Image (tube, rainbow, N blue to C red):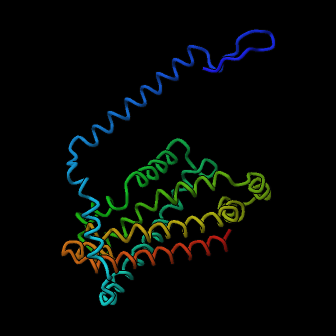
Amino acid sequence: MAVRQTPSGQEWRRRTPRAALVMWLGWLAATALTVWCWYVMTETTIWAFVYDAPRQAADIGSRMVPPRLAYLPELWRPLWDTINIATLGTAAGVVIATPIAFLAARNTTPSPLLLRPIALFIIVASRSINSLIWALLLVSIVGPGLLAGVIAIALRSIGFVGKLLYEAIEETDAAQIEAIDATGASAPQLLAFGIWPQVAPAFWAIAVFRWDINIRESTVLGLVGAGGIGLQLQNSLNTLAWPQVTVILLLILATVLVSEWISAKVRAAII
């Protein structure tokens, strides 16, 4: 504990004895919790496998090289399906999320006590479940295929788009809306000329950003039967076709990089 003499001759302490005791007890509790969590996580770990992991990784890596480029033509259709899953799912999610966002925003909801809590619940419920879990549920309901992937992406997108959009709506300039309202404008006119021009840039930026995220998420939906290039990846992993896995991973990486570039360009043009 830092102790210094003040000009008046009194001792200055950085912390009082009580504060120092509380701090050290907090550190002790955090250390104990960390040790306990580590014990729980590693209780069933087979350490022989962990020690052997570098050798296994090197062995699989050697099997993945060189990539089987002849397999590339078979991936164009699944890749196109993946892009369609992301695009259609994003479009559906944005369409559904937009009215929900207006119901959730404090300055546009027609019913703060009823409709706003319902809208907020939908947003939270959508964001709480990962798209892979949505796909797993939907494959059991509607069967395997692209439809399950599109719906899964849409359901996941509702919460993301709805939350960011309703926050943008709440941040609109009230003075501009009041000025239009003073002219005798109706509610649709207030929405069209007072609110929408202020949130339109954020709306398009959010939509493009979500599409970029969905491109990445849709690449793995095939692992649970929702179609796309993830299905080819699952098949290659099941058959231990490591050179094909390399080609698929490189193609996914290239697709994500292109989608990131497109998203950045569009957002820069909008904002």
- Depth check, front residue: 217 or 234: 234
Compared to 80, does 180 lie above or below?
above
The picture places residue 7, in percent across and down from the top left corner, at 81, 14
Q: Quadrant where the N terminus lies?
A: top right
Q: Which residue is at a point 26% across and 63% down the rendered structure image?
A: 55
Q: Quadrant of residue 199?
A: bottom right
Q: Quadrant of the C terminus?
A: bottom right
Q: Front-most of 32 and 255?
A: 32
Query: Residue 184: percent from the left, percent from the top?
Result: 76, 58
Could you say where residue 215 lies in the image, as x and y percent from the top left?
44, 71
Using the image, determine if residue 261 lies above or below residue 15: below
- Residue drawn at (53%, 54%) of the image: 163
Q: Nearer the viewer, residue 62 or 130?
A: 62
Figure label count: 0
For residue 41, above or below residue 100:
above
Apparent side of residue 128 relative to residue 260 in the rendered image (left or right):
left
